Amino acid sequence: MGSSGNGFIKKAMVIGGGIAGITASIDIGNAGYNVLLVEKLPSIGGRMLQLSETFPTLDCAQCTLTPKTVETGQHPRIQLHTYSEVVRVEGQAGNFIVQIRKKASYVDWEKCTGCGLCQQKCPSKYPSEFDRGMGLGKAIYTLSPQAVPNKPVINTSHCRYFLEKKCRVCEKICPVGAINYQQEDRIIEEKVGAIIVATGFDLMPIERFGEYGYGEIPDVIDGLSFERLNSASGPTNGEIRRPSDGKVPKEVVFIQCTGSRDPERYMPYCSRVCCMYTAKHARLYKHKVHEGQVYIFYMDIRSTGKGYEEFIQQTMEEGILYLRGRVSRIFRDGEKIAVWGVDTLTGKKVEVLADLVVLATAIIPHQEVKALAQILGIPIDLYGFLTEADRKLKPVETNREGIYLAGCVQGPKDIADTVAHANAAASKVQSLFARYS
Ligand SMILES: Cc1cc2nc3c(=O)[nH]c(=O)nc-3n(C[C@H](O)[C@H](O)[C@H](O)COP(=O)(O)OP(=O)(O)OC[C@H]3O[C@@H](n4cnc5c(N)ncnc54)[C@H](O)[C@@H]3O)c2cc1C
């Protein structure tokens, strides 16, 4: 199915290849329509690719995600444009003309077999963004060993050839001659009838969050960094070791609502997943470090999903100490991190000497989403999340016919709600296409 007699194009573009974009693409593809899936990173998977295990079932994120990324990569109706960004959108529902910038990867992906030799031999190492600085990445890289597509890109800010005109190890080692340092960005033009925006979320960055020693004390990290430490395919092979000296932390403090529900200083809204992922982190830590002690500072526990309350109860029964109250100060004390706070239930001061502090920092939209919203001609809210047409009755539609939202780009969500939102956006596209025979 391509276009109707009246020129209505029955092909969709999905922007963002996280679990929302993947789900929507598979749904639309399975309904018999072609889909362009545009992802800015070299491979699809989104944040879920960074997670270790997932609440509420504690099953391995990769085991759930990999069948979906593989299905997407092999789907006859889904065309992947990874390492790409949408730069222009014109027209209207049924006939959007879109321009996509395909960024130079400096690797000819047609020739590349994904053997991985170039990554093994590349001598340039630097703190990996994917591993949130917990480990080192290479200048030529894929995001994960199960990357879809399994094709590397060169990061020119760290590649010795681009910095000093030296090295060329990847070019010498590549058995099929796929390295091409001369490659340039390309703009391609496509026509689609509907668009789903699924560009997900970011965590509040260090520079906007000058509190709790974050960015100053290496052993104060955020939730995604903890996910990478706990991940079997992560930089420590799943052993929880603190960044400063690689020691296994024996006392760990988790602090919820750091940046969320704080209207005076940061974000007034609830980030919705932190209560659950903090409980998950605490349990996963205790499963690995049995003698370890965990403290969780919280304001109140919000656990409204199916089975979530039971998950929190189970966490408390596993010996994790919940302290209701805010932390007032965090500072270095020798090799330790002093955490001062108050337990408002007992009214007592709490002072913990911790080895590791994990902050559940606020979920925010990506910085570039504002520019994307302008390109698409759709509104954003006060905090930068894309705005649905109606809070209650049109949660996936925007104020432009043919443009829909899926997942955390509209607001913080867990995976189950993200998938449901993406299913809904995909069915909106199908019913739009069905109206034009
Ligand atoms: C620390 C932490 C732990 C979590 N643990 C759990 C858990 O255990 N269970 C659970 O249910 N939920 C968990 N979550 C929530 C879960 O991560 C989200 O529900 C899920 O990732 C949302 O998927 P998404 O597709 O909407 O967004 P994302 O996963 O953010 O995917 C968005 C994709 O869009 C791409 N993109 C961004 N901008 C552009 C652009 N301009 N053009 C093209 N592509 C773009 C991104 O690169 C990314 O691939 C956790 C969240 C955090 C922070």
Image (tube, helix red, strand yellow):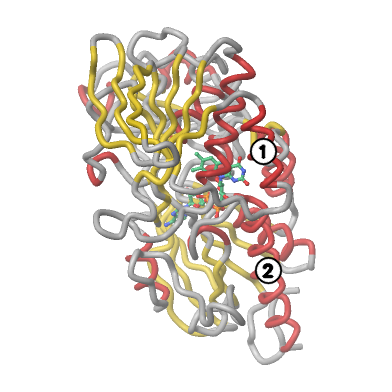
Going by the numbered disc 2, the residue's amino acid type is: Ala
Q: Residues within 10 Å of mark 2 (few under 14, many from 20)?
A: many
Which residue bears the numbered disc 2? 426
Toward the viewer: 378 or 146? 378
Residue 103: tell me if it is visible: no
Q: Which residue: 55% across, 84% down? A: 401
Q: Which residue: 62% across, 69% down? A: 12
Q: Which residue: 36% across, 32% down? A: 348
**Residue 182 located left or right of residue 224:** left
Q: Quadrant of the N terminus?
A: bottom right
**Residue 423 located left or right of residue 233:** right
Alpha carbon distance from label 2 to label 1:
36 Å
Q: Residues within 10 Å of mark 1 (few under 14, many from 20)?
A: few
Going by the numbered disc 1, the residue's amino acid type is: Gln
Which residue bears the numbered disc 1? 313
Nearest-to-viewer mark from 2 and 1:
1
